[in-house]
Amino acid sequence: MRADRTIGSRLGAYWRQYDIALVGGAVFAFILLVTILASAFAPYDPMARNIKNRFATPSTDYRFGTDQLGRDVLSRVIHGGRPILAASFTAVLSALAVGTIIGVAGGYIGGWPDTALMRLMDVMLSFPSILLAILIVATLGVGLLNVTVAIGFAMVPVFARLVRSIVITLVYEEYVLAARSLGASDLHIIRKHILPNMMPPIIVQASAMLAVAIGVASALNFIGLGVEPGTPDWGMMVAEGQRLIFDAPHVPLFPGLAITITVLSVNYLGDGLRDHLDPRLRRQGI
Amino acid sequence: MFNLRTFSTILIVILFLVSLGTATAQDPQYGGTLVFGAESMGDSFDIGFWHGFGGVHVIDTIGEGLVRADFENGGAQPGLAESWEISDDGLVYTFHIREGMTFHDGEPVTADAIVRSMKRPINPDDPSYIEGMYMYGNQGASNWESLEAVDEHTIVLTLMQPNATQLLVFSRPDGVIISPKALDEYGTEVGLNVSAAGPFKIERFVPGQEAVLAANEDYWAGRPYVDRVVIRAYPDEAGILAALEAGEIDMTLYAPFTSVPRLQNSDNIRVEVGAPLVNLFAGANVAMAPLDNLLVRSAINYALDREVLIEAGLNGFAEMPASLIGPLDLGFDESGREISVYDPERARELIAESGLETPIPLDLAYENNRFWPQLAELIAADLEAVGFDVTLDRLDTGSFWGKVGDGQTQLSINQRSTFVPDPHGKAILMARAGAEGSQTQHHALQAADELDALITAGISTADPEERAAIYQEFQALMLEQLPYIYIGYLTPPIFVNKRVQNVETFGTAGGRINLRGVWLSE
Amino acid sequence: MISYLLKRLIWLPIVLWAVSSLTFLALRIVPGNPIQTVQNQVMDKSQLAQVEAVWGLNRPVSEQYLNFLSKLVRGDLGLAMSSGVPIRRMIFERMPPTIELAIVSLIISTGIGVLSGVASVAIRNRAIDYSVRTASILGLSLPLFWVGIMLIIVFSVNLRWTPTSGRIGAGVDYDVITNFMFYDLIATGNWAAFSSFLRHLVLPSVTIGLTSAGFVARLTRSAMLEVMNSDYIRTARAKGLYERSVIWKHAMRNAMLPIITLQGLQFGAILGGAVITERVFSYPGMGTWLLDGILERDYSVVQGGIIFVALAYVLMNMLVDILYHVIDPRLRNPSN
């Protein structure tokens, strides 16, 4: 009895602290599941055209209606998560990896390598990221991989600067100085003392950047430089559907909602993770 | 109580108002501001450069060349020249300039002023000369032996070779005559301060945004009806629709076609249908496999279900195609309609006959704007149904033309709208010169020289009947060799506010608006 | 401080050189060139070879590059290849509208972001906290072209409160002096035009402001949380200071640094990157100009425009650094 209560109350406390993060996690898990097993969930072939049934409004046959070529919007929404999520996650994670290497190198080594790296980041940042992405896609051609490269490339300096700014505060922390005076190797210090302490802000930044990545991916589609045409993709559907907003609002609305729900869930999950990893914030209870 | 006098007074007032109302519905009215929504607004109106269609609309509204084009019946109409004679050998043009005209800046329109303006691209000493004014290339100056003002109101142009389109190209935007005072005063920045002699004059220009044009009180054909025309950029299709519905714009060509059914039922908007001046087609790169094979090109021709393409891709705003030359052009050949048809069985047979292994891999390139992506998807589906494996190649404008120019596309879809009502503007696509940079790479075509000879014959023949026969032969050969496969003649919707009356639907359909006769009711 | 700034200034030309060289290179790698983009408009193809020669496009890239650099050093940005207009003239036309848009957007996003960020921490109410967090994430994720057209539909088409697009009403008269309307219209006392201008600025700046307010709110929230738990706030509280003064004086001072950094970056991003917003609202700024330049492969437009964007970005960052030192005296010893 007593043990149960303890577990129950612990779970209750855990739930109270992480409720929204848990909901976010559950929703995101569901989205991933549907996205990965899309064919099992989709009622129709997302590519199947029915010219005679264009712009059908939502009905029991077509829950989300049909689009400009008479394709089932629901099936396209179910299939449409894979490309944009794959591109955005890959872009953010690769940018994070590269940015971390640059940021740690600059912040930890300091001196002229740091200055040179940061000025290089300045050069990249001063080139508007959307224009940079457009140039990259125009050069490499449309397609998922190229969109990923374009978005990731533009995000590297953001992470590099963030990481560096954390690292330069950490290198003067007492435990780092102590470890160094004890003769710990640089790699050891970075792995044991610096990387773990960077995680909370980086998780938050990364989940926010995922939202940005999805936004840029949609924007690229809007300019006509996104995934291959015809591919069911949320960004593409929202972008192509924008001009239909007066005449067939259901076409862009549902993929737009899918984007929003996904981004919200990932960000709540990220916030929860951050709170969990950062003991100081855990005490705050918010 | 009831007073007969009051009653009759009221009755008379009502009758008067009604008669006033009917009068306004019939007789053109002066006054008002017409806002035209363009897809872009350039940074200058220098006619030596291309500034997008927004720029063309402004130049067409303020400008006047020696002649104007008659898009409805073909041929030229008087412009700054009230009449002209052409010598029998087609080499000497004598233009009689209307007397008493002035440019917008008050300078008199004289033969000297016109010659000066026309020689701007070939006179590096002119203060307004800029290296690289490529649009003037359309004026045919490389074929001019001499151009002189023989007296104040007469100009004589002597050509080296006869050119049947010479007269009409003077009606192009790059044929607009500019005031010598403006050319001197603003020099190379004359494009920001154009002073011409057309029906409207520039009052204010905000690059990238709008041009405010005021009626030219001294226009030779009389002052236009509206007081002001504002041509304003709306690059986003949904944005232009919003502006149309909010009553901010009175007229546009650039709203999405999909909105037409709803707008046709709206209280304040009317949709008119433009003439079939623009040809939509797929160009086949005949220098590269598999499109070097006539059987394959022919199979593509029969594979396209044009009714569906037009209905689903263009919302019905196109006519069924015949050939490269349009139904309003000289020498149009109706019989082409029997070749540009849907016959998937025949397409499959042709592919079988070609002996190529199916599915045949094929790239389809197109621009990433307007209706092209949707058309491309539909075309790809048609082609896959008969045995092709299509890779869609969506490109931005620069990449599209870059790839086309390098001969790296296979099948590519685009359009041709000539700026003057003459078949040459479409036929020139097949000229031998420049073939290496063209969509079809037709230097590799068997009939390349024959086609080139027909184009040359077409332009150097003066007699319309003889010319018509030449273009019919040209079309027959084109349909036999199929470097182009035709999708349709676009009949674009013209969106207007119901208060806009007397809209010209011919030139407008080809992107050349004419607001001289437009007036606003109410 | 001054020596630090001088150090940054020395970097300025190097950064600009790197940016312009990268731009130059990128444009040569992208398929298509300015001639090919206009070829469809010109019937006499022999003319095009001539034009190609005029612009030196037939020369080796290395030669083009040296030529470009030597002109750049002399401050000659050349003519736009597609329109023949001097680039400096276009910068005058296109830069001020975007700077005005950027400043107003930043004011909106800072205002909304800071207030909601503070509210979510200071008012100890989960509902408020969650709604602020949700709204800020929404702001990050909603595509701008979507937010923009929604605002247009609601406020311009249905309510008719604001115009749909443009920088000022169609056909409104005004004098251009600096092309900054906040200055020009006030200096000339043209209040009718000024009110039209403000009404046109509302929706595009709110579109950008709302979406970037999310960043500010998140940043404010986390910075506040950090500070609220730190020793000196606890000391301040222990001293019996009022909650309000703790929040505004101490916590905000700490939150201001990251917010200023972020907004400095945002300013640079909006300057050349408000492509989507400018397009949806037909706003004649740098973003649409540069986008068209890229799509038409107008080398001189893109090269000239990007240099100015980079210049503004670098200067803005220097300003941010100066503000840093003003706000946080601890940083006056420039060890990093």
Image (cartoon, rainbow, N blue to C red):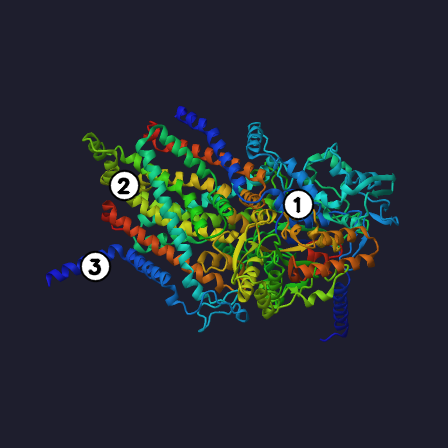
Q: Nearer the viewer, mark 3 or mark 2?
A: 2
**Rendered view: B269 above or below C309:** below
Q: Nearer the viewer, residue C80 or B3?
A: C80
Label 2 residue SS: helix
What kind of residue is marked 2? Leu
Residue B144 falls in which quadrant of the image?
top right
Please state the chain letter of the residue tagged with numbered disc 3 in the rendered image: A
Q: On the image, numbered disc 1 is attached to which residue?
A: B50
Q: Nearer the viewer, residue B104 or A50?
A: A50
Say if labels 1 and 2 share a chain.
no
Quadrant in which the C terminus of chain B is drawn: bottom right
Quadrant hosting residue B154: top right
Against C89, is B292 above or below? below
Give how far apart the Cα atoms at labels 3 and 2 are.
Answer: 32 Å
Residue B429 appears in view: yes
Query: Quick one: label 2, few (<14), some, or many (20+) residues within 10 Å?
Result: some
Q: Amino acid at mark 3?
A: Gly
Q: Secondary structure at mark 1?
A: loop
- x 57%, y 41%: residue: C94
Residue at the spot 35% in from the left edge and 46% down from the top edge: A205
Checking the image for residue A195, the label placed there is 2
Residue A44 to residue B441: above or below: below
Q: CA distance from mark 1 to mark 2?
A: 55 Å
Q: Which chain contains the residue that carries disc 1?
A: B
Q: Residues within 10 Å of mark 1 (few under 14, many from 20)?
A: many
Who comes first in sequence, dot 3 or dot 2?
3
Q: At which x and y percent is residue C52? A: 64, 38
A63 vs B163: above or below: below
